[in-house]
Image (tube, rainbow, N blue to C red):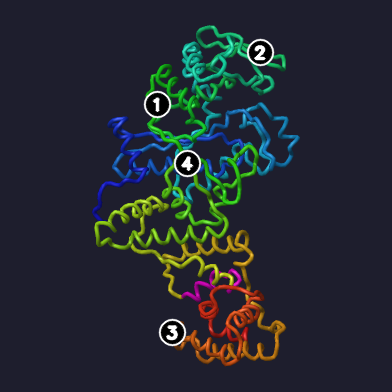
Amino acid sequence: MSIERPKSTHWADITADKIIRERGPKDHYTCASGITPSGTVHIGNFREIISVELVARALAQKGEKVRFIYSWDEYDVFRKVPKNMPRQELLETYLRKPITLVPDVLGNESSYARKNERDLEVLLPLVGIEPEYIYQAERYRSSRYASGIRTALENRDVIRRELDAHRTSPLADDWWPASVFCTACDRDTTKVTGWDGEWGLSYECECGNRETVDLRHTHAVKLPWRIDWPMRWKEEGVDFEPAGKDHHSEGGSFDTAKLTGKEVYGHEPPVTFQYDFIRIKGGAGKISSSSGEVVSLGDVLEVYQPEVVRYLFAGTRPNSEFAISFDLDVLKVYEDYDKCERTYFTKPETEKAMKNWEKQARIYELSQVREVPGAMPYQIQIRHLCNLLQINSGDIEAVMEYLGDISEDQVAKFRNRAECAWFWVKNYAPEDFRFSLRDPATPLPAMGENERNAVQALGKLIEDTMGTMPEKEWSNLVYDLMVEKGIESADFFTLVYKALIGKEKGPRLISFLHTIGKEKAAALLK
């Protein structure tokens, strides 16, 4: 589908235009993201990843070549054992060592860091994200950054001035812009004692080890974060990298990195923006990997289809805080996405409608995992799907057979939505939303003779007439039956719900009976 429309005002396109304008014409533009795999990579971390991917996609759609890199900072220090990890005592013995040396106590990966990396790397393609991964432990341990570290040492006083400008108290006189992992104990419990002006860096460790290492041949030396960041901007030629509001706060790491990037490494700071935190509906505070109490991308994908996950982020400005919901709001999120999809495939007829279409169409395009569908996809209202799944005890094949109009090319997406809906029903839906049909082999619930006669009469009415006329017209027959039996509608509905699902309330009754189907509904009530 191709419709001529004005320039997009989506934030990803605006950022892409800014990158092209400020960085000038280039063979390619480098967009960067990264994280320390100190624990489960949570959905808050994912916000940065998808924000970069959306901008990279916008650049590519403007005809530009893009390099999207994602750095695993697994040569950072293991500072804290997450509360949700087993073998706490073992893990505590690795504190102050590089995360890449911590063993994987949950599986068979080469390290704790690699376990956290793999958990994310296998999921990102599901939501259309496939960056080029850079593993910083390998880079540092192979001395690839020797020149960058030496440049920092040569500019020690410049960097000190830049950092002190944003500190309440100045750095100590013996401070050096480098840290060392002791080659004897692997910990960073070290102190730099001198530099020979070239490649030799001397240190001493709390364990008693003292030595001088050659930057060109050692795995031991690393730059602190605020210096490491701008050094890598230069190394990779980074043109765009966003950051959270903690890094973007006044005097935060982005402020100092900009100065170091320009004055020490001769690299103009990348185009950036600030993204806000994400809340979990019903939870409180900032998500933290180190605490272990997190919601991962995998957790979200159990409830939301990949396109809907992308929609949540593409449809929200990065600097706006929002919540990932697991309660009844899940239904609204799906309904909003479906409405956005219908809008995309509806040709606008007025100028006013065109403006709204522009906005929704771009959000929809960016929400797609790969290419935008060429025709309107199969849609099923999420609440209706949840009811069908509960009627059929989660049997997706039975639901597809009942619907009978799902084409072969839509089966995969339908099954994915059904799996998400069923998982949500079983694990997150409120109790009053859940139900299961009574086994027709069991007796009807206890009720008076007139009440039983009324319920059984409804079963007969269903058997004889349901489906032979419009739903609204048939509902009049049901109300006539209530009048005939002398039972108030509220009381009658309660009786029927008890007979159907063992509860006093349920989905809107007339539609619910049609959804259950004539044969099954009649059997339950007769």
- Which amino acid type corresponds to the residue marked 2 in the rendered image? Glu
Give the extent of the magenta segment.
391-403
Residue under label 3: 470
First in sequence: mark 1 or mark 4?
A: 4
State which quarter of the image contains the C terminus.
bottom right
| Picture quadrant of residue 453 | bottom right
First in sequence: mark 4 or mark 3?
A: 4
SS assignment at label 2: strand
Q: Nearer the viewer, mark 4 or mark 2?
A: 4
Asked if the residue under mark 2 is in contact with the one under mark 1, i.e. CB atoms within 8 Å, the reply is no
First in sequence: mark 1 or mark 3?
A: 1
Q: Nearer the viewer, mark 4 or mark 3?
A: 3
Residue under label 4: 49
First in sequence: mark 4 or mark 2?
A: 4
**How far apart are the alpha carbons under marks 4 and 2?**
38 Å
First in sequence: mark 1 or mark 2?
A: 2
**How far apart are the alpha carbons under marks 1 and 4?**
19 Å
Asked if the residue under mark 3 is in contact with the one under mark 1, i.e. CB atoms within 8 Å, the reply is no
